[in-house]
Image (cartoon, helix red, strand yellow):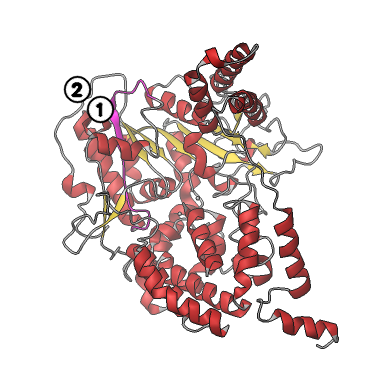
Amino acid sequence: MKKTVSVILSLIMAFSVFSVCLTPSYAASASEEKIASCNGDCEFFPTIIIPGLGQSSVCVTDDNGNFILDKDGNKVSAFPAYLQVGKIIRKAIFPVLLSIATQRDVGLSDAFAAIIDDSFGINACDLNAKPIGNVKVEKFMYPYSKCSEYEKGLMNMHIPFEKYPSDLPADHIYYFAYNSFDNNIDLANELYNYIQMVKKQTGHSKVNLVPISQGGTIFSGMLEYHPEVADDLHKIMCIVPALDGSIIIGDVFNGRVNFLNKDYLYNGFLEELRLLDEKTARIIEIAVRILPDEVVMATLNKGVKHLVENVMTRSTSMWCLCPSADYPTAAERYLSSPEMAKIKEQTDKYYQAQLHARDNIQSLVDRGIPVFCVAQYDYAVINVGENWNKQNGDFIIQLDSTSMGAYAANCGEQLPAGYAQKNTHCSNPDHNHISPDRVVDASAGLLPDTTFYFKGQRHDLTQHNDVILEWAMEMIAHDDIKDVYSSPRYPQFLSGRDVRNIEALIESAEKLDKSKLRGNDADKLDKAVKDAKAVLDDTLATSADFAAKEEELRSILVKYGAAEKIKNEDPSFLRKISLWLYDKFGTNGYSEIPIEFVKGLFHIG
């Protein structure tokens, strides 16, 4: 049971780690009150952030539309599920115990499917692709300057405005919150109406848009359904946009799911998932054998079936994350029945938007509207589906989708010797769009001169890359950066980074009482802090540079108890046990192993 729960949660984290009618639409509640102090007469353009999957506050409500609160008085999140621990235990306890005792599926798979339906069903849609769960989105019908501290906190969890301030006035910053499982056409229409609202509130005739991850699908849909919106746009800054979905969803919707292959499930899936350390992964591999493999697989298969069929395939927003190459077969698989006709009509419409996405974006550029993009590469896509290691990506989305067509070697590989850039979208012979590590050919992407690439950056940790955030805050306020050649701080190819550890170490170092340091350790600490701050300020620093300065600073702090030493636990013993079990007994549970042992002893079967 623990294994199946881990796998299901890992799948959901990968969508992440992917509102009912009571929620007012942006059109209905849009305020025409003039809010911006400039009344449209200033050098800045209002900017609308369109966040990614799960980056909006979507909370559970009761039947009257009132928020449900937890024991601490906080609103209960509905993303990605409404997990009621007590209810889950009550449903699972007896089927789990009976199944272990009898070594058969005594209601376990049914209980697990019911838990999936109860927990994730809060985000289910009806056969018209309209949300039916008791959820409400906390929307912001006014700029950041008018938000309460609570509302600012919601935004800063995902886009740290307070940490990376911009010259853009706070009354020009807007956050388009939405339900990630909602109806895509409705969301695209709401975004269009939200733009009109922002124009009225600020007095400006044009806005900037910043679509992030799943927000790219809403942006892409809006361009297709409302091409007239081009008149309202000043500049677009896409950050890892899922413009052609994610191969994770393509694999899931086409039944190419790795963990439904029991040999992979029992032999390395959890370790390669990279959401668990190897020790934990191997413990689960060993422990799960308390049940026969057919019970584990029956439970897992039924849970996944309910999640996909009852929640994901009824959400047009989830369909928007299916790559265009995978859509026809996936639609045939799940949307071919008459009862799914209304959903298919809408997903077909977005499929056309997907096919036209690059042309629609090119049309903006042709009109003189600058479009910029941040893409990330050389971080293998999470191994939920069979295609995880067949395309370069950023853990969640393949590079082809976020870069609008850049060509790349697979993760850990390089372009072949003698490779010449394709120049698909660049005709300037003086431009070199091949990355210094010879992994990416940016000339094949739609926007070779305005797409910035970050090596080794994990998609769900983008918000912790200070260079990306500083670049974005500069871009929303000013028009100085025209392309990848405009600023030496922001060339076309940069490195991924996560600043949390080194910033925490600097803070600890600055609080340390230096009078207690021995020998020349005070001088060493000062130098380590100075070097750490320098690497933070260096936008060109590599991940290796970061790691070296972090280790230098940590070693001194550990010596004086101001930081914890990184513990790399040795999982070799557990690994040997798990591999031995798999090698000798395949995926059999412990109750089946004696029989297999006897068979092997006497060469039976």
Nearer to the camera, 74 or 360: 74
Is the residue marked by circle 1 packed among few (<14), some (14-19), or many (20+) residues within 10 Å?
Answer: many
Task: Relative to 78, say whether 46 is above or below.
Answer: above
**What residue would you read off at disc 1?**
171
Q: Is residue 143 left or right of residue 14?
A: left
Task: Report, in whole angstroms, how far the alpha carbon at label 1 lies from the one at label 2.
Answer: 8 Å
Residue drawn where x is 47% and y is 48% of the image: 357
Q: Is residue 418 left or right of residue 265?
A: right
Magenta stretch? 165-182
Report the residue at 21% width, 60% height from top: 21
Q: Amino acid at mark 2?
A: Ser
The answer to whether one can see residue 87 in this image is yes
User: In the rendered view, would you say 534 is above or below 245?
Assistant: above
Residue drawn 35% across and 63% down?
84
Of 403 and 84, which appears nearest the observer? 84
**Type of amino acid at the residue the image marks with label 1:** Asp
What secondary structure is marked by label 1? Answer: helix
Q: Is residue 470 above or below residue 355?
A: above
Q: Position of residue 129 (x, y in %)?
A: 33, 65
N-terminal-most mark, 1 or 2: 2
Residue bearing mark 2: 37
Is 492 colored magenta in this rendering?
Answer: no
50 and 430: which is toward the camera: 50
Look at 41% across and 26% down and name the residue there.
Answer: 164
Q: Is residue 324 visible?
A: no
